[in-house]
Amino acid sequence: MTLMLASVADADEALLVTRGGADIVDLKDPRRGAIGAVDIEVASHCVRAIGAAARISATLGDPPYEPEALAARARGLAALGVETLKLALDRASLERLAPTLAALARDVKLVGMLFADEAPDFDLIPEMAKLGFSGAMLDTRRKGAGRLLTHLDVARLEAFCARCRAAGLTAGLAGALEPPDIPRLLLVAPDVLGFRGALCVNRDRAGRIDGAAVALVRDLIPREGAPGAGADNVDWRLLGRGLVAEPETEDDLDRIFVHDFVIEADIGAYDFERGRRQRVAFDVEALVRRAGGELKDMRAIFSYDVILDAIRIVAAQGHHEFVETFAEAVAAIVLRHERASEVKIVVRKLDVIEGAVGVEMVRRRPGSAASPPPAQRAPGR
C-alpha cells in the first residue's frame, strides 16, 4: 500500500491535511527549500494539533550537518513526538556522519533524501540500510526546475524502489508531483508519495494548502481495503458513501488505447539477439471501469501514460527471450490498476523480417465483466 505524505508549514495546515486523509504529516518550512527545517515551536504546535490522527515526519534542514547539532535537533523533534526524520545525503556526508547517524537510527526512524536533479547515487541505499535507516526518498532540490519525472523516467524510479525493497528500506517519491503523476508512480509501488505544491492554492508551494486539492490527491491514491484488495467490482467512492455499486457491465467500460508505440528492447531467444537492441512495436487496448460523475479531474481519467510506462518498465528490466513473456509482463502491470478489467496487447518485432512478427494476447482481471464464465475459459498457457 502506498501512503500519502503531505508537507505542512504550521498547525492549521497540519489539521487540514489530517482531516483530508493524509497518512503522514511532514513538518517543514517550504520557504527554505525542499527540506527547509521547521521551527521547533511550530513543530510542537503541529504535534499537539495532530495527536495520534496521523504519522508525523519532519525535515532536519539543509546540509552541511554538524554531528552534535544534527543529533540535538533530531532528538529534540523526536521528544516532541515526531516519528520519522529526513535529511539530505551524499556519499561524503554519509561517511562523515556515519557514527552519529547509526546512534540516532537506534532511537528514531531516519529517511535519507536523494535528489533526482543532482545525479542521485542509488548505491547509497544499502549503505543507509547498514546504518539502520528506515527508508530512502527521492525528491527534487530545485523547485520550479521540473517534476520528478522530468529528471528520472519511470524505469529509473522502479529501479530505485526495487533497490529500497531489496535493502529492507521504505521507498518514498516526491518532487513537484502533480495529480497526473500519481497513477504512473503507483505502477512502481512506492511506500510513500509526498506532496506540497499540488496541495496548495494555485500550486504555489509557498502558499496555503487547499482542501479541495488535498481531496483530489487523496482520492487518487488507493487506501488499504480499496480495489486491488479483493473486491474488483465495487466502486469504492460509492461504498464510502454507504452505497454498494452494481457489478460492472460492458456499458460501464471505456477502451483506452496506445497504438504504434515503438521502443528499443533487448529481446530474442537466439544468441545473436542478446545484447542487441531491437525495435518493438506495441498496440495496447485496456478496458477500464468508467468513473462516475463529470470528467473534470484525474479522478475520472485512466491515463494512457499507465500503458506507456508499463512498457517502459518492462523494457528496462533486462533481456527478454520471448515477445510472449514481454507482453505478459506489460499486461500484469496494467492490470494492477484498480479500474482495468482487460488488456489486449499486440507486440511486433520490426527487425526480424521486412514486415513484422509477434504475438497478440488478451488478459483479464478475474471476476471482471469482460471475463467469460469459468466454463468458457481457454486453458492457461
Image (tube, grey):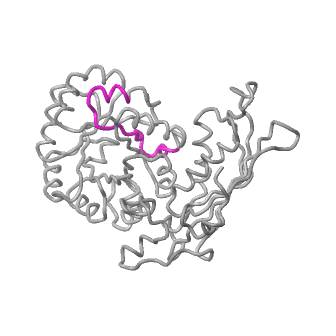
Residue 35 point in image, percent of width and height: 31, 41
Residue in the foreground of this view, choosing between 7 and 331: 331
Which residue appears at 47% of the width and 51% of the height? 186
Q: Is residue 130 magenta?
A: yes
Q: Is residue 56 above or below residue 164?
A: below
Residue in the foreground of this view, choosing between 50 and 167: 167
Single out the residue that lies furthest toward the right. Answer: 354
Q: Quadrant of residue 128?
A: top left
Which residue appears at 65% of the width and 43% of the height? 326
Which residue appears at 52% of the width and 52% of the height? 184
Q: Is residue 325 above or below residue 366?
A: above
232 horizontally vs 371: left or right: left
Which residue appears at 35% of the width and 78% of the height? 242
177 horizontally vs 16: left or right: right
Q: Is residue 232 above or below residue 336?
A: below
Q: How many marks?
A: 0
Q: Quadrant of residue 36?
A: top left
Residue in the foreground of this view, choosing between 187 and 14: 187
Residue 317 point in image, percent of width and height: 58, 36
Residue 129 point in image, percent of width and height: 32, 30
Residue 356 point in image, percent of width and height: 82, 44
366 horizontally vs 263: left or right: left
Q: Which region of the structure is painted magenta?
A: 125-149
